[in-house]
Image: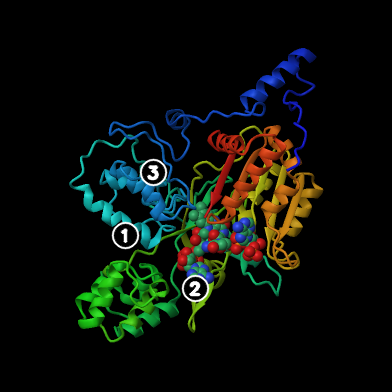
Amino acid sequence: MSMAPRPPIPELIPESAPFTPEQRTWLNGFFAGVLSLDGAGVKPLSPAESAALGLPGMTAPASDGDDGESPWHDQTLPLGERMKLAEGRPLRRRMMAAMAQQDCGQCGYNCQDYSEALFSKKEARLNLCVPGGKETARMLKTLYQELDSAPSPAPTTEAKPADATAAAAGKPGSSRANPAEATFLSRTRLNKKGSAKETWHIEFDLAESGIEYQVGDAFGLFPTNDPALADAVIAALDAPADFPIGGRALRDVLIDGVSLGPAPDMLFQLFSYITSGERRQKAKALAAGEDPDGDAATLDVLAAIQKFAGLRPEPEAFIEALDPLQPRLYSIASSPKVDANRIALTVDTVRYKIDSRTRLGVASTFLADRIAPGDTLKVYVQKAQAFALPTDPNVPIIMIGPGTGVAPFCAFLYERMATKAPGRNWLFFGHQRSNYDFFYEDELAGMKAARVLTRLTLAWSRDGDQKIYVQDRMREVGRDLWAWIAEGAHVYVCGDAKHMAKDVERALIDVVATYGVRTVNDAVAFVAELKKTGRYQQDVY
Ligand SMILES: Cc1cc2nc3c(=O)[nH]c(=O)nc-3n(C[C@H](O)[C@H](O)[C@H](O)COP(=O)(O)OP(=O)(O)OC[C@H]3O[C@@H](n4cnc5c(N)ncnc54)[C@H](O)[C@@H]3O)c2cc1C
Ligand SMILES: NC(=O)c1ccc[n+]([C@@H]2O[C@H](COP(=O)([O-])OP(=O)(O)OC[C@H]3O[C@@H](n4cnc5c(N)ncnc54)[C@H](OP(=O)(O)O)[C@@H]3O)[C@@H](O)[C@H]2O)c1
């Protein structure tokens, strides 16, 4: 591997600062050291230090003997591995390991706070972790059984559900427990005709909502199911659409009250009670998380009813067996500094076929197909935990956001434009094909012309024979990337959690190792330190 020469100590103290050249040289060296820009080793913060900084995923040593480390706090690890890493830990820590580790806030908490809330019995719902799905719910159910027999020292950190805080604050629109109403304004397709993707720029009017947000926050919204799917479920159940459930018609509850996505274990349990023989065995196996026919992953609620065709559960028991319909979160793509009454999102539409039926992502198709301009819906702002512009407007930023990951970076750029922030801004965007999937091409060109967007680096994965991803471009321009980082740039990543985020981090480590002239181990520690000091922030899903 060819090594680039070690970069000089960066000029962090401007020429105009009131120092002699000697003082400036000394201060540059001092700050480079403080920022870990010089010297190979980076000493990681201790859990207590991290907790003191309020950084996610860490907690101070606890009275139950736990050291506060969360080695499982990595959304790319499968559940089995996460649970292994948590083996021997107190129950509340194993509960945390069962979460999907995205700290996405969809449950109304972060992963740690949700587990602390379950452990302290302030929260009883075991099925709130959307990215963890059935796997997490099942593991939590198993762990929950230990709860009554477990010694119960007070949790070290007070669980802070966003819900409770907002309810106390009484501010509508500031949590999923306390939504406000917004008006749907418009949708504009971001891909050109011929694209394999369907992505929409969505706008809402917040004028009547009282909602306030900041760039980096996410927008939560309560979607409804496709009425045609609710009707198909009613037909498969052979139940009257107006059957009363808690004072409402069955059809209405199926549209806005329950999830018609993956069939929950409880539904198979219900089926097992009202059938017999081989079908009962199958329903019991499915309820236990087994896959007797190899089709478990394809069984949404309708497919599950069809699999057990002819069973006619009581509509109330049926509804009781389903999961509640959860809100969905979207990164905010606008800045309130431009227009505090408007909010924009970038939404990829989820549609896929299993057998002959097209399955619809609830919220994304609600936004793409079913909501009309002028309609109102329940919404809230999910405050970002650690995803925000640097407080110093002079600090340069590097934003890596392929696909819908570009959304918060549009917000960042608008904000920096509106506030005339002098810091430089570098965006890595990528998608499938340049002719069809160049989201916000005109806006980004305008920002470049206005010198708000200092640099735009593009990666098209399906333009040529070889896939080019954002991380490939990062390696190509590694020298410049390192120079920005050495000058104190903050690095942001948004988009796919499962693969992209990990691959981008790997690329960043390579860049730091190559151009920062470090061993791989030191580069890993350097990037970990960037994370711990809030200079490497992720909004991934
Ligand atoms: C903090 C945060 C920010 C987010 N920001 C954005 C954003 O800016 N833009 C955006 O588009 N999304 C964003 N998301 C994701 C978003 O919240 C939803 O998860 C997404 O829109 C899908 O929701 P849905 O209701 O349409 O689909 P759902 O009804 O939830 O269905 C999605 C599920 O369908 C299944 N599925 C999807 N495709 C296939 C397939 N091909 N084959 C088999 N199964 C499949 C998967 O199990 C998937 O989990 C964000 C999520 C979080 C947590
Ligand atoms: N579960 C998954 O496996 C998966 C994967 C991707 C996205 N998603 C989800 O799909 C939704 C919308 O996605 P989106 O519209 O934002 O776009 P996207 O599907 O994430 O694609 C955006 C771009 O990223 C590329 N890409 C794929 N794998 C990558 C990787 N490992 N590293 C870097 N880039 C990679 C894609 O290339 P190609 O498509 O040509 O490979 C495409 O050019 C999100 O909710 C996301 O989480 C899920």
**Residue 309 can be seen, yes or no:** yes
The residue where tag 1 is placed is 138
Lower sequence index among marks 1 and 2: 1
Classify 10 Å Cα crowding around label 1: few (below 14), some (14-19), many (20 and above): many
Q: Marks 1/2: CA distance?
A: 24 Å
Q: Horizontal and vertical percent for residue 207?
A: 55, 53
Three-letter amino acid code at disc 3?
Gln
Residue under pointer 3: 112
**Dot 1 amino acid type:** Arg
Q: Are marks 1 and 2 in contact (CB under 8 Å)?
A: no
What residue is disc 2 on?
A: 360
Cα separation, mark 3 vs mark 1, equals 18 Å
Q: Give the residue displayed 32% in from the left and 32% down from the top.
A: 62
163 horizontally vs 380: left or right? left
List x then y, in percent, for residue 195.
68, 72
Disc with the residue nearer the chain's start (3 vs 1): 3
